[in-house]
Amino acid sequence: MGGADLIHCDVMDGQFVPNLTFGSGVVAALREATRLPLDVHLMILQPELSLKFYAAAGATIITVHQETCPHLHRTLMEIRRMGAQAGVALNPSTPVAMIEPVAEEIDLLLIMTVSPGFGGQRFIKAGLRKIEAARALREKTGVSFSIEVDGGIDTTTAGRVVAAGADTLVAGTAVFAGSIVDNIRALRQASQAC
Ligand code: ZN
């Protein structure tokens, strides 16, 4: 699909975040349409109630927000038990230290570099320090989780987040405005420039 490595699906419930997008039906339709990994980012309250629908829909990675999970360890274990990779997302105001006790249960750590809820926002620079903190945590714990960045990623920010330690970049506006193939190629070049 235009040169992407995975398809990031932003599920929003109109409660945890202001916007409302789609649910597991669209994830299932995407599963029919592509063989690429489906990276499902649940910006929803009580995600533990609907994990099974996203796993059944064919999600490769299911990412929940730390802020929505009082029993995060259990929720991550459930995601893995359903056969998906387990991700945790952190809002800009949530420190990386919040997930240190569950680092071994995490396949992917998603650092939000905007407040989640809608596209087209500007990158929050403090996110760079959190990416560095995530990389330091990975080295300290010896757990090989991916570090993904979501929000405000374009050709000016891509190189900086990769230099800070990110290995997976999510982009919406910077991909879909114009030619998707050209845009993804430009993002790849920018991410290798620093
Ligand atoms: Zn997302």
Image (cartoon, grey):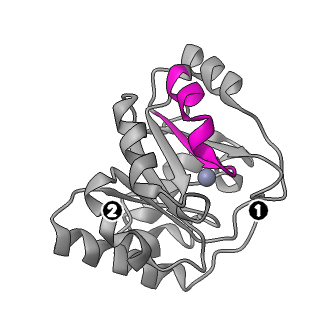
Residue type beneath disc 2: Val
The answer for how far apart the CA atoms under marks 1 and 2 are is 31 Å
Left or right side of 156 for 165: left
Residue at image position (76%, 62%) is: 120
**Residue 67 is covered by the magenta coloring:** no
**Residue 53 is covered by the magenta coloring:** yes
Observer-side mark, 1 or 2, equals 2
Give 99 or 117, whichever is nearer the viewer: 99
Q: Which residues are magenta?
A: 38-56
Q: Is residue 103 above or below residue 175?
A: below
What kind of element bears circle 1? loop
Residue at image position (46%, 57%) is: 72
Q: Which residue is mark 1?
A: 120
Q: Which residue is mark 2?
A: 102
Marks counted in the figure total: 2
Q: Which is more N-terminal, label 2 or label 1?
A: 2
Where is residue 21? Give x, y as percent: 79, 41
Left or right side of 137 for 111: right
Instruction: Place residue 100 in its image quadrant.
Output: bottom left
Most distant residue in the top direction:
32
Instruction: Place residue 116 in its image quadrant.
Output: bottom right
Residue at image position (24%, 68%) is: 138
What kind of element bears circle 2? helix
Q: Is residue 168 visible?
A: yes
Dot 1: within a 10 Å radius of its alpha carbon, few (fewer than 14), some, or many (20 or more) residues? few
Left or right side of 16 for 109: left
Work out which quarter of the rendered image holds the N terminus and state it: top right
